[in-house]
Image (cartoon, rainbow, N blue to C red):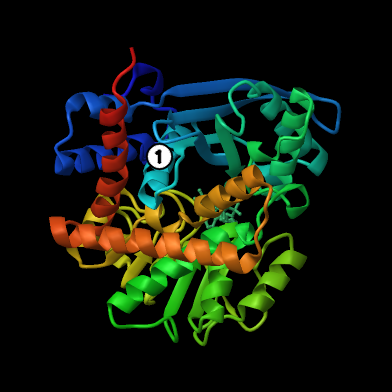
Amino acid sequence: MVLTSLSPQESPSPAYICPLDQACSYLEEAARELKLDRSIIDILSNPRKVVTVSIPVKRDDGEVQVMAGHRVQHCDILGPYKGGIRYHPAVTLREVSALAMLMTWKCSLLGIPYGGAKGGIAIDPKSYSIGELERITRRYTSELIKDIGPAVDIPAPDMGTSAREMAWMMDTYSVNVGHAVPGVVTGKPLSIGGSRGREMATGRGVMIIVREALADLGKSLVGTRVAIQGFGNVGSAAALLLHQAGAKVIAVSTGMGGVFSDVGLDIPALKAYAAQNRMSIVGFPQAAAISNTELLTLACDVLIPAALENQITEDNVDRIQARIIAEAANSPVTLQANQALEARGIMVLPDILTNAGGVVVSYLEWVQGLSYVFWDEERVNRELENLMVQAYRQAIQQTKVRQISLRLAAYTLGVGRVAQAFTDRGLYP
Ligand code: NAD
């Protein structure tokens, strides 16, 4: 049962697939498998705290625009809340709530002592100047000042935000409390306590999980044909690392369009091209144009949706030709599409496992910050590798023991550990 404050549908579109309903369905499925009490399911179906703040911002032309900023804290039974801040026009409170819930299971699955949270503002960052984005970020942080902190809730970058926004958040928080607090955010620039390896971490985690899944099928990354939707932080890092490992990245797209090359794209050159063209890859030489719709249904070995939710749906699932889908984005495959893919024997590497590399290295950044000892990149990558492979192996083991899909296995591990913590801590008062 989800509380009424989150119940009204916020999207007018009839095709709208509610991310919170989907997240709750997966929770229910895992709870059935684990035979959890209804009381625990009810607790876990609802976020512990939902904050919506009003953000008045002076635009460069002097006009004042007021926007809503959300922060949803799902569950802190295992440790402080942790989760990204998203700037995207499609952000809604229900979406942020769903993503906060996924973060709880992800941290638990990876054995990281955090609870799940997420934040977001429904804006297109491309429509704002850097000065405007700084004022939005600082006011949003200032409004949340009592709800975040290194032992309370630690934001990180997500879609539409990066190390730059984290530096503004860290500075705003620090100025407000009167001293430097690097641990209030992760994904910061190195100059203020960021971790080596953080920028590539989510993409590196994706590469590790794809590599392990292929190895279980007796295959290697070398020569594997990969298509990637999204060429931002996650998609571009995954593309580069897969390319370096010998995979053929045959197609990549962004919100502005995509490119295709049957012999494989030169990813370092593509990254350089995007950096010179305001992150657009359209017009990249020696490649054909391809739409996002075409990219998703390309014949390839591995399809990596690394952009938005709900990209593989009932509408296109029958045309998917990939043998493995690696969910680098959160919830890119809908519940119905997931069932259809399972029925067709297409392996889905679930988001809470596949894209966990970011939160793993965020955790390592936080640990380094708390201990005032900073590691070299090799150590960070080694710790990331160990935690990702361990979680993958545990989830695979669970598929065998329980005879369930990899997604359900990942959920039973994530949800099961949180439920156990509830039982052990007991209900206050
Ligand atoms: P980003 O903003 O850096 O990049 C997003 C990319 O998606 C861009 O290339 C953008 O052009 C593209 N895109 C946007 N709309 C699109 C559309 N309609 N079709 C195709 N491409 C489109 O974001 P990111 O940080 O790379 O995050 C991507 C996904 O990964 C999100 O679902 C996010 O929640 C998830 N994720 C990110 C992290 C992280 O560390 N950044 C960690 C875990 C999960």
Q: Which residue is drawn at 33% across and 39% down?
A: 23
Q: What's the residue type where badge 1 is placed?
A: Thr
* Front position in the image: 310 or 302: 302
Answer whether residue 302 is visible to the viewer in this image. Answer: no
**Residue 58 figure quarter:** top right
Quarter of the image containing the N terminus? top left
Q: Residue at x 26, y 25 (%)?
A: 42
Residue 361 horizontal side relative to residue 28, left or right: right
Q: Residue at x 69, y 47 (%)?
A: 372
The relative height of residue 272 versus residue 131 in the rendered view (above or below) is: below
Q: SS of the residue at dot 1?
A: helix
* Front position in the image: 155 or 17: 155
The relative height of residue 155 versus residue 263 in the rendered view (above or below) is: above
Q: Position of residue 191 (x, y in %)?
A: 78, 52
The relative height of residue 401 versus residue 98 in the rendered view (above or below) is: below
Task: Identify the residue under disc 1.
Answer: 104
The relative height of residue 199 versus residue 122 in the rendered view (above or below) is: below
Residue 429 horizontal side relative to residue 86, left or right: left
Q: Residue at x 36, y 41 (%)?
A: 15
Quarter of the image containing the C terminus? top left
